[in-house]
Image (tube, coloured by chain):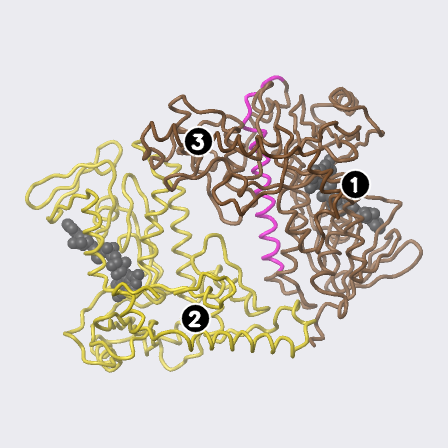
Amino acid sequence: MNHNNIKNVVIVGGGTAGWMVAAALSKSLGSQHISIRLVESEAIGTVGVGEATIPHIKYFNRLAGIDENEFLRNTSATFKLGIEFVNWRNIGDSYVHPFGPYGIDMQGVHFHHTWLRQKQKGTAKPVDEFSLPGLAAKAGKFQHPRPDLKSSPMATMDYAYQFDAALYGQLMRKVAQERGVKRTEGKIVKVKQNTENQNIESIELENGALISGDLFIDCSGFKGLLIEQTLKTGYEDWSHYLPCDRAVTRLSERLEELPPYTRATAKEAGWQWRIPLQSRTGNGYVYSSQFLSDDEALASLNKDLDTPAIAEAKLLRFKTGIRKKTWNKNVVAIGLAAGFLEPLESTSIHLIQSAIARLMTNWPDKSFNQPDIDYFNRKTQTEYEQVRDFLILHYCATKRNDSPFWDYCRTMDIPKSLEERIAIYKENARLYREDLELFSSVSWFAVFNGQNIEPKRYHPLADILDDEKLEIRMAELLRATKRCVEVMPSHEQYLKDLCASK
Amino acid sequence: MPDNNPKSVLSHLRYAYHFDATAYAAFLRKYAQQRGVMRIEGKIENVLTHQDSGNIQSVTLENGQSIDADFFFDCSGFKALLLEKTLGVKFTDWSHWLPCNRAQAVASERTEPLLPFTISTAKTAGWQWRIPTQHRTGNGHIYCRDFMSDDEANQILLKGLDAKPLGDARTIDFQTGCREHFWFKNCIGLGLSSGFLEPLESTSIFLIQQGIVRFISLYPDGQLSNVLQNEYNRLMSREFSQVRDFIILHYHATQRDDSPFWNYCRNMSIPHSLQHKIDLFRAGGRVFRDDQELFSKPSWIAVMLGQHIVPEVYDPILSDIPKSDIQRSLDSMNIAMKQAVSRLPSHAEFINKYANGVRT
Ligand SMILES: Cc1cc2nc3c(=O)[nH]c(=O)nc-3n(C[C@H](O)[C@H](O)[C@H](O)COP(=O)(O)OP(=O)(O)OC[C@H]3O[C@@H](n4cnc5c(N)ncnc54)[C@H](O)[C@@H]3O)c2cc1C
Ligand SMILES: Cc1cc2nc3c(=O)[nH]c(=O)nc-3n(C[C@H](O)[C@H](O)[C@H](O)COP(=O)(O)OP(=O)(O)OC[C@H]3O[C@@H](n4cnc5c(N)ncnc54)[C@H](O)[C@@H]3O)c2cc1C
């Protein structure tokens, strides 16, 4: 065995990020030859939000060896078929960003070209009606996809979850501890670095205990205890693109018929989420403190709750951006310590998951090979930038002019990468740019179209069908999609049955 | 043929073809003409451009016939009749990284057994290909004329044949590199007019194909938006540089010091993008496929290991698995592959049956 192998991993922080890392590492590395220790402080606590996810979470749960029913019962989870965006392009408008494709691709071009052709002819139905997850979401229905039903929209629909973040953390903790992860309670007060290479050697707790390690995973939340406070890595600020910097959150009673989707409603100086769980509803107003006071935000949040509040409101401050290096020396920052992108598309937990996967493929030894680290950092940066661009699109492609906040967003400078992407879509409705992007071309289309960006033209291949055949095919698709929704059980009932079963 | 059953080792099999390029072009010509493509025989003597836009307006043939169009594809080969001669698009020279600049090619008689792979043999100042087709074997010696005379190159070519040559060798000059723009004004260059990378990994036809696919997906209208043009150029120049790096790797990662040519290649500076890939592999055996890159992980591993770039350590993730377990699973993979191979028909048998309509 290589004496240079990492033998001691220390995870700093026991929020969602810390325990996800602990669960995944203990599952993949075992605990025979490697010791994994997690340090957390109950006195400091966790950020306590983070309830909505995207479909990739299913892979993570599978990797961690979690049974879906057990997960649903233990985390108060509901199914999520997409996000409804209300009042984003204009007050009164709404659209769904669904998990799964619209219609089916015809004549070798993406479905949206065919739909755009119909739209230009003036015969198109709203594109939401071609999306099974979109329609089912609004109808309050759910069932698992049926990949066995080949040409049915049931085969290609996808889903994610909405869950109680604290309970999910506990589930991860159970998984990790069963696999040998050791947990230490205590507040870290001091960090010791190697005098030569500045690597972290050990951390010291309030009670004087010393914990040393070869590799430190910094999951200490916004402050970045190791990556920033100790290593002074620096932070790239993106708040000129995404000016929201605060959130006021509040739990309210459970919704009566559980909707299988998250709602994001644009407001005067930001937006408000509504995330339905089995036990309660999560709510939060994400806003820009430049344009709105905390008191105004709280009043506005309270006014827009759909059910009576059941807890005090909580205020959170953040700065959108990314750590200049998420891996620096022998410290890898994951979760809020790595960077922050607002939860508009529920991406933070996914970014944790993806950082874990990247760490596993680039698993270091004690020499901490710099090209591997550079690669890791480059990929993290690209991933955050791609999500960032997608979020900005929701803000900049708006017609709203009812508040200084929206005037800013509508007219602000946007990254060149996004500018080019919008220009290409406007020109000929082409969506696809890079491989390995988190959001598929379907997601980009959902938001482009939802925000009313009109392409000049569609792909000429979509013209191959003659008019009459086109209308027939599209009508068939609409009928098939509708029929699927009709036969689906209600989300409420489906969940009840699943959670009752073993 | 690859097996559809994902559990079978044969499901991982991938293949391409060796073929007669002239016959393939004739096949495509028939295909295109049946679908309405009009062919005009004649030599282009003159090209007319619009005064304001600089776009190409028409080409004029020797016999005076003039042909107008909205859009032109320049497939005129190395000379790049439209892209370079008319529109003045410059060429980016890469010959400091890939110094070979001449080829001599000759066909030879078919030999048995019919091999299902290309052989590329490094020579004193370049390399020689051997490409077996059903009726004959294609051979060519690619070399750098700054390091070798044509006579010597010819002797090497003929000495390297394993059967009688069919005629005299043909000499082809080239320069490695690509156009600064692949799409300029109302013209796209495809094939040799757009750039050249030596056939060491048989990539030229693939690059033509990529250009076509990209064009179809971007499909401009009469206004020829710059947005589409920039995107096309961005994608194609990335494609060319990725292939370039892969080819350079074969030359640079060598231990040969038996000729000035190889001394040059071993010591030359290489693109940063490639250096980074080599560093990652050398340190920990890691290979990452960049966005939409043609060559996949196994390709890079094959050449890195083949050229003796040996990682200093293997992935530490494996360090907890006992050596004997690793050995056992490698052995069983090896046995499964050997067994699968022993059950396959010979290449010649397979072609005989398959080409005659007997599906196996
Ligand atoms: C308003 C808002 C809404 C969000 N909504 C979503 C969403 O819908 N979907 C989604 O995917 N994500 C969402 N997120 C993000 C998500 O909440 C986080 O990504 C997730 O909770 C992970 O947080 P964390 O574990 O990195 O940090 P934290 O939860 O802050 O955990 C930090 C840990 O470090 C420990 N710690 C800190 N300092 C010390 C010390 N000195 N000594 C010992 N221990 C210490 C703490 O005790 C704690 O255990 C949202 C975030 C915000 C702010
Ligand atoms: C030595 C060598 C080996 C190669 N091996 C491989 C390989 O193994 N695999 C691979 O994929 N690729 C290989 N290639 C590349 C491959 O040969 C070319 O990509 C392919 O042949 C395409 O060439 P082309 O059509 O661009 O140009 P050409 O074949 O040169 O065609 C040019 C056409 O333009 C016409 N033309 C030119 N000027 C005029 C004019 N004034 N008026 C009218 N018509 C005109 C010509 O008549 C001709 O029809 C190799 C290339 C070389 C040099």
* Identity of the residue drawn at 27% across and 42% down: B187
Could you tell me what secondary structure mostly forms the magenta stretch?
Answer: helix
Any atom of ligand 1 within 8 Å of the CB at mark 1? yes
Q: Earlier in the sequence, mark 3 or mark 1?
A: 1
C-alpha gap between disc 3 and disc 1: 48 Å
Q: Quadrant of residue A4?
A: bottom right
Q: Could you say where residue A426 lies in the image, as x and y percent from the top left?
A: 43, 31
C-alpha gap between disc 2 and disc 3: 59 Å
Residue under pointer 3: A476
Residue A66: in magenta span: no
A427 shown above or below A269:
below
B39 shown above or below A7:
above
- Residue pushed farthest right? A207
Q: Residue A55's mark?
A: none
Any atom of ligand 1 within 8 Å of the CB at mark 3? no
Q: Amino acid at mark 3?
A: Glu
Q: Do badges 2 and 3 share one subunit?
A: no
Q: Which chain is yellow?
A: B
Q: Secondary structure at mark 2?
A: helix
Residue B78 visible to the viewer: no
Q: Residue A47's mark?
A: 1
C-alpha gap between disc 1 and disc 2: 52 Å
The residue segment tinted magenta is: A373-402
